[in-house]
Structures are given as structure tokens and as C-alpha cells.
Amino acid sequence: MQWLTEGLRQVMATADTRAPRLWLGLALRVLERACAMAPFFLGFFWLGDPASGNQGLAQSASPGWLAVGLLALLMVQLLCSHFGQLNTFLGGYQLMHGYRRSLLDHVGRLPLGALRRERIGQLGERLTEDVKRIESIFTHVLAELLAALSVPLMFMLVLVWVDWRLTLALLVTLPLAFAMLNLLSGFFLAVGRRKQQGFLEAAGLLVEFIGGLRTLRLFDRAEPWRTRLDCQFRAIERHSLGVEAWAGSAIQLYRICIDMSLALMLAVAAWLAATSQLSALSWMLFALVANRLLDPLLDAAAYLSELRGLAQAQTRLQELMQLPEVQEPLAPASLHGHRVVFRNVGLRYPGQAQWALQGVEFVVEEGQMVAIVGPSGAGKSSLLHLLARFHDPQQGSIELGGVDLRQIRLEQLYQQSSFVFQDVQLFDGSVLDNLCLAKPEASLEEVVEVCRQTCCDEFIRSLPEGYDTRIGENGQRLSGGERQRLSIARALLKDAPILLLDEATASVDPLAQYEIQRGLSQLAQGRTLIVVAHRLGTVCHADLILVLEGGCVVERGRHEQLLAEDGLYAELWRRQQAG
């Protein structure tokens, strides 16, 4: 049971809320079960049994008092049932509200690079289905399990006073029953973990399959992906059967031991009756309550098996909670301008032996345009990710306005910067809603002007409802170039002093590219502009061009200077001109 108590403790610690209604509800549910069992014992003590030292109340009180007592127990049971369930549900939901809030707050403080490593389907499964599984523990299972275990053991203590021999017969097999239940728990948990991991893998594959279905069909690769999904589903089926086999075997052994206790009690009762050591009233009490005491213990096995599976969900969420958050200072930093300095920066991604960036040093003066170019895999995007604090460098430091980025609050950093990355992220709302994410207070005139400068206005007005047109999840109703132009317009609308562009014109046609570059040239005036570019012709007018290869800066200078050096930049330039 240690795994259960530890899991519950972690959830409550994460939720960081007392949830008194939950504890009240649990207590009332236990009292409800006790009231359901109490009439048998009230009748026993009312009638009296001299053999057990009970003289009874019937000789000194009228039967009306027995009726009053039974009615009172019934009313208390009904009230406890109603208010117990009500408070258990409300308290459980209150606790889970705190848990969800803490979980989402933690995810919101994780480095964006850590989230980018997570598959969307798997992360979504954790944050939705796993949380729902934990919620069901507190709203449905915990009260039933607590009542199923506590009430029978509580009344067993009373039965010891009635007849310790029959009580011992009922109790003697219980340790063996719980041992049987735990015997196969290790195998059950291992198979259960494989089953849930299979579900997470399947969720990730499904999201990728649906999102990339068009590409898969165009390259005639949809069938292999379906085969891959079928294999994953068959693996889930095997693991599910394994879970049922191990859990079913353990529960059946547990039930056999519980049933043995009833048989043993009957055998002891027969022997005591044969030797005139058992009164009829004591035998009647045991005969009436034995099944009622053992049935909840049988139910407890099912609850425990269910809780083991639910506890695995909590373990996965706890692993997410243990991911280190971005470390931020308590107070905003005092920046002196917007000069960007890389000092001997080195970056190595988790789980990788090679450095993505190493020994990177350069300075971007305020108002300069710096271009970062190089072959694929050279580390260009990684450099921008460091500026956005998706990751922190393992070596060296990055400064903005004379302050290390790690000493600048993320909110302050993002107020100073606008980003346009290769992977455009839009939301299922109107065009205007998506643009105004950058500047909620922007007027329609401001939005339209920025859209004109980035070649968005014309295609937006051609949409059915213009700027009020809903664009679907991640802008799926727009083309790739249209999504990219919207992301550029959104970044420029923010009007931040630093503008970071990662292949910003990679998805647009040459005419739109020319128009966007012209708009960027106008709007970049007075701003610090750092551009990752594949098309060298779009950045040949930059104040400084950095050429990366293998994570290192191998060349730097202006366009004409780099061509004269006839190095890697000149080679890339000739290839693009020839193409």
C-alpha cells in the first residue's frame, strides 16, 4: 500500500490545497457504511446474549426505543450517503483544480526546448487522460476503497468481543489473501506500464499520421504508416490481455482466500455448536454479518487493481513535474540598450554527444542587421533558440543590453523581442485574433497597415469574411506561404526593438518574397535584426554575415568581403546562383 499512499501524497502536495470537503466526504462515506452494518449489532445488543456477557436492553426498555434507534441509523445513513458523495465529489474536484493549475503552471515554466522534444500526442495524453484518471481516484475510487477496508475491520473488533474464536476464523486467512493480491503486483505493474507506454506511442503516431496524411498519400507512404499503427495497436492488445491475466489471477487467488475464511468460520461454528459452546444468537449475528463484512473486502481487490493502473498515470505526470523549470530572477533586469553579445557559447542538446554549437562569439550592435547562414545542420536555428531561451548554453554566456539572458525574466525578454520561426503556430480563431496576439490593443488600421507591408492584406481581403475569417486549427485553411506571411505580420505588429527571423521567407513565392523583404527593410530601421537565411540573396545587404559549419563560426564579414575570401560563403553563393 506504500505505492498508493506515496502517490496520493504527491498529488496533494502538487495540488497545494487542503480540500477539507474531500476529507469530510470520505469520513461521511465511511460512516454511511458503518450505519448500514450497525442495525445487526444493535439488534444483537438489544436482545442480549448471556453467553457473551451481554444482558441486553430489551428487559429494561420498550421495543419503541429499538425502532427509534433503527430509524435514526437509517436517517444518518441517508444523510451521510448524500452529503458524503456531494463533499467527496466537490472536494475531489477542488483538489484536482489545484493539481491541474500547478501542472499547467509548471508546464508553462518549462524551457520551450524541453516541450519541443515531447511528441504532441503523448503530451496531450498526459495532460488530459492521465489527469482524468487521477481525478477518478479522488471522486470515485478512494472513498469506496477506504470504506471497504475500514468498516469491516472496525466491526471485526466488535465481533472479537462477541466470540473471539469465530472472529479469528474469519481473520486468519486475510493476511494470506492480501499476500496473494500483492504476489503478482510487480508483474501487473510492469505489464501495465508497457500497456500505457503503448497508448502514448499510439497517440503520438495518430497525431503525426493525421497531421501528415496529405504528405503520406502524395508519397504513397500511407499504407506503411497504417501498418505501423496496426502493429502498435496489436502490441497494446497483447499488453492489455497481459494486464487482465495478471490482475485476474491475483484477484482470483485473493477471492479464494477470502472465501476460505467463510468456510473456516462455518467449520469452527459447527464444532462449537456440537460442543454446546456457541449460543444461537451469536451464531445468528455471525451468519448475518459475515458476508456483509467480507463482500467489501472482495470489492477492495478490484479497487486496488484499478488504483495500480491509475497510480501509473500519476507516476508519468510526476516525471513531467520533475523536469527542471526555467530559472528566472525575481525582479526585472535593468537593460542598457539592445546590444546582443555571444561569449564563447556552447550548446549540446540532452542525450546527444556532439555539440550543436561551440565557441560561438559575435556582437550585434543596436540597430544592426546580422545574417546567419550555412549548410543544413550547421546550428543556425539553434543559435536563435538560445536567444529565445528555448535552451540555456552549457558553455559561455549570451548578453542583452549588458545583462546575461539568464538574469532577465522571460516576460521581459519576450517584450523586447519578436520571433518568426520556420514552424508557424496559428490558432483556431479569426485572422484578426491571430494577428492581435502580438498586440491586443492594436487598432484595425494598425493591423491593416502591417499586413499591407508584408503582402498579407490582399489575400486576407479575398477570404470569405476578410479579417474576421476563421482559419482553422494551426491555420489549416491557409496555404503555407499565407501562414508564414501572417506570422511575419504578427511579429512586426508587436513592434519590439529586436526582430529574430528563422527562414522567414522560405515558404513564399519570389514576388511575395521581394515584397516582404522590402517591408522588412523599411520596418527594420532602428531595430536589431537577426536573420537565419537559406537564400543568400535575401541577406546580402546585412551589416554582418556569420557563416556556420559544424556548430562553429567559420567566416564572418559583409557580403563583398566574404565573396573576396572565396571560402564556404562564396561556394554557397555560387551554388545558389547556378541553381
Image (cartoon, rainbow, N blue to C red):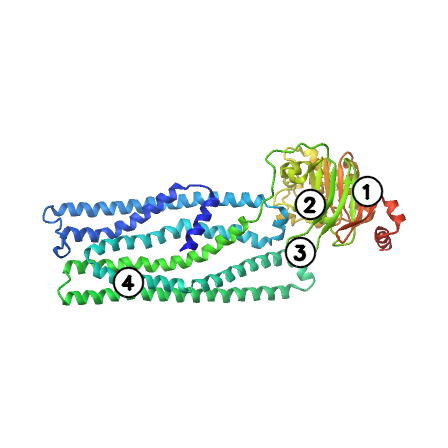
Residue 221, placed above or below residue 392: below
Q: Which mark is residue 78?
A: none
Q: Amino acid at mark 2?
A: Leu
Which residue bears the numbered disc 4? 172
Q: CA distance from mark 4 to mark 3?
A: 57 Å
Left of 392 or right of it: where is 575? right
Q: Residue furthest left?
A: 59
Image location (x, y in percent) of residue 542? 82, 42
Work out how far the residue at label 3 is from the one at label 2, CA to CA, in angstroms. 17 Å
Q: Is residue 398 visible?
A: yes
3D distance between C-alphas at marks 1 and 3? 31 Å
Secondary structure under the numbered disc 1 in the rendered image: strand
SS type, badge 2 = helix
Residue under label 1 = 544
Location of residue 216 by image quarter? bottom right
Image vertical order of residue 444 relative to residue 428, above or below: above
Residue 199 position, x and y percent, is: 53, 59
Nearest-to-viewer mark from 2 and 4: 4
Residue 506 image point, x, y percent: 75, 49
Q: Secondary structure at mark 4?
A: loop
Closer to the chain start, of discs 2 and 1, is: 2
| Residue under label 2 | 386
Q: Earlier in the sequence, mark 1 or mark 4?
A: 4
Name the mark nearer the viewer: 1 or 3: 3
Give the distance between the C-alpha atoms of the residues marked 2 and 4, in whole angstroms.
Answer: 65 Å
Contact check, label 1 and label 3, Cβ < 8 Å: no
Give the quarter of the image for residue 90.
Answer: top left
Q: Which residue is mark 3?
A: 352
Upstream in sequence: badge 3 or badge 2: 3
First along the sequence among labels 2 and 4: 4
